[in-house]
Image (cartoon, rainbow, N blue to C red):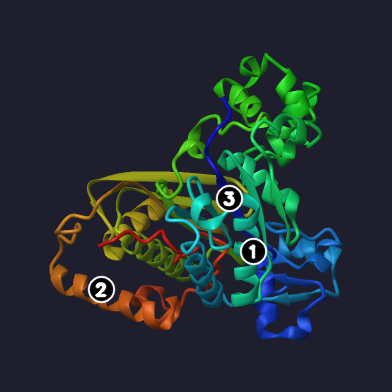
Amino acid sequence: MLSSRLIFHLDMDAFFVSVEELLDPTLKGKPVIVGGAKDQRGVVAAASYAARKFGVHSAMPLRTAAKLCPDGIYLDGHPHLYREYSAKVHKILCQFSPKVEMASVDEAYLDMTGTSRLLGPPLKAAHDLHAAIGSELNLNCSIGIGSARVVAKIASDLAKPNGILFVRPGDEARLFAGLPVRKMPGIGKVTEARLHELGVRTFGDLNARDDLEHYFGAYGSAMAGKARGEDAGGWFDEDIGESAPKSISHEHTFNEDTSTLQILETTLARLTEMVARRLREQNFEARTIQLKLRYSDFHTITRAHSLAEPTASDHAILTQIRGLFHANWNGEKVRLLGVHVSGFDAPSASMAFDFEGSDRWKQALTAADRLRDKYGESAVHMGSALKANIRERTHENPTGIPGRVKDK
């Protein structure tokens, strides 16, 4: 029996670059790379289609992009504006469906099941949504339509740039058969290489194999199911709008490796501040605090500590992170630091403020969050984080994704 679900996946085209072009129209048609200066160690957050012709793509190291596109225009970007426009996109989406889930600042899923009487057939609704984004925000987007999340996501990718693709129920296996396996959400370089070793290169090859579970376990069956257009387990099976993050993290790669203790400690303080802010923003507390430390030779260690009581306090998290750092750092130069929290609970009345002056500290954090809401994330910092040289990067663990903040 064919599915009666109707799912849209909307993906903003080169979103960060497009917002930059709104600020500076002279950038249109030029090779623009958002993420930082080309001599920095960061990664590409977004690349214009002109830059992509040189082989530049998101998540590529900036220094690699600089070799491929030395004459490109490299921008730090404006994270607060990306969040602002993301919120505007979300507002428009909510006019088309009561069930909207922002997967990131520039993509969203909409459950359109049962909306045809009000909005018309799927393609009409998609064209109306596409037109609304274009006319109200002057931005382009691509929309995929299908009976499952995975189908809609693949369809939106095939519809790029600035297009719409409706994969009708029952046509998935036929339409996807020739696609390379890397087009499937969740398949990365390692899995792709393993599949190639087995002679599996396309969705059709996946669908034809009945032994994938032998090589990949349950994930093998899930891949075959996705090739047929089935969500096939995991996050893709969840209802639109009902998923919640399982963890929150922030990382920072230094432009130059460092063993200077003050730099390392202030960076940890700033990362902790960013993570704790997101916990409070989403009305969560975390029980597990984890440090990530990568040395110059790329040797990476992760160490975690579980708390008796969950917390969303900068002070409580930083105390644990500092302890983990000093217990595990060997004094060598560090390339990357990261702070990761998980094991979420709803907030308690005490919020793990169990030190002297905790009431004043809680009031201070509340006031600081209000100032950040009004003036941006860099408006207020802990004293221990003031000297941290970390630029806000919306593409790395962004704050303020519309629809993610829980009611308080």
Circle on res. 366: 2
> In the displayed structure, would residue 390 be above or below residue 347?
below
Q: CA distance from mark 2 to mark 1?
A: 38 Å
In this view, the mark in front (2 or 1): 1
- Measured as percent of width and height from the top left, residue 123 is found at 65, 52
Residue located 60% across and 40% down the image: 150
**Residue 60 placement: quadrant:** bottom right
**Residue 406 placement: quadrant:** bottom left
Which quadrant, please, contains the N terminus? top right
Residue located 50% across and 63% down the image: 398
Neighbours of disc 1 within 10 Å: few (<14), some (14-19), many (20+): many
Circle on res. 130: 1
Dot 3 amino acid type: Phe
Dot 2 amino acid type: Thr
- Measured as percent of width and height from the top left, residue 367 is found at 26, 78
Which quadrant, please, contains the C terminus? bottom left
Secondary structure type for disc 1: helix
Of labels 3 and 1, earlier in sequence is: 3
- Measured as percent of width and height from the top left, residue 243 is found at 42, 46
- Measured as percent of width and height from the top left, residue 207 is found at 71, 23
Neighbours of disc 2 within 10 Å: few (<14), some (14-19), many (20+): some
